[in-house]
Amino acid sequence: MRIYGVDFTSAPRPAKPITVAHATLHGPALRVEKIERLSDFDSFEAFLRRPGPWIGGFDFPFGLPREAVVALGLPTEWRAMTQECRRRGKAEFRRRLDELRESRKEIDTRSAPATAPRAPTPQ
């Protein structure tokens, strides 16, 4: 049976693709035979429609930084947080994330140095 290991990204592009390891089990050993890079969602969806049998392990980035959870006024316990996000709805959640991102850009712009600091030159 074909085994896939998938490192997912929520914004695939050529510079940061969804990475798929193709493997097969040989006795107790897992042999990786190929690494595939999927640079867009259409490619990922085509991958999911491949005929089987196959099994996959997926690494999805579903977490939120604690700082964002607190800034968004969400509960810090997982179940309560997911229920609150569901209650608010996708549009409201996205709007609040956009506001948070914009507020962080303003802070970053105000506090950024005019030029990037440089490491001292070795003598």
Image (spheres, helix red, strand yellow):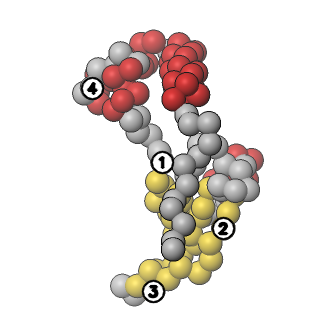
Q: Residue at x 60, y 61 (%)?
A: 19
Amino acid found under the numbered disc labelled 2: Glu
Mark 4 residue crowding within 10 angstroms, few (<14) / some (14–19) / many (20+): few
Q: Residue at x 40, y 27 (%)?
A: 68
Q: Position of residue 88 (x, y in %)?
A: 45, 12
Taking 63 as reference, is 25 above or below it?
below
Give me the C-alpha separation between circle 1 and circle 3.
27 Å
Give SS at disc 1.
loop
Kindly identify which residue carries mark 1.
60
**Quick one: label 1 or label 3, which is nearer the N terminus?**
3
Kindly identify which residue carries mark 2.
36
Amino acid found under the numbered disc labelled 1: Phe
> Can see residue 97?
no
Give SS at disc 3.
strand
Give me the C-alpha separation between circle 4 and circle 1.
20 Å
Amino acid found under the numbered disc labelled 3: His
Q: Residue at x 50, y 83 (%)?
A: 31
**Quick one: label 3 or label 2, which is nearer the N terminus?**
3
Tell me if label 1 and label 3 are in contact, CB under 8 Å: no
Number of the front mark, 4 or 1: 4
**Outermost residue to the left:** 77
**Quick one: label 4 or label 2, which is nearer the N terminus?**
2
> Can see residue 42?
yes
Mark drawn on residue 76: 4
Give me the C-alpha separation between circle 4 and circle 3.
43 Å
Mark drawn on residue 26: 3
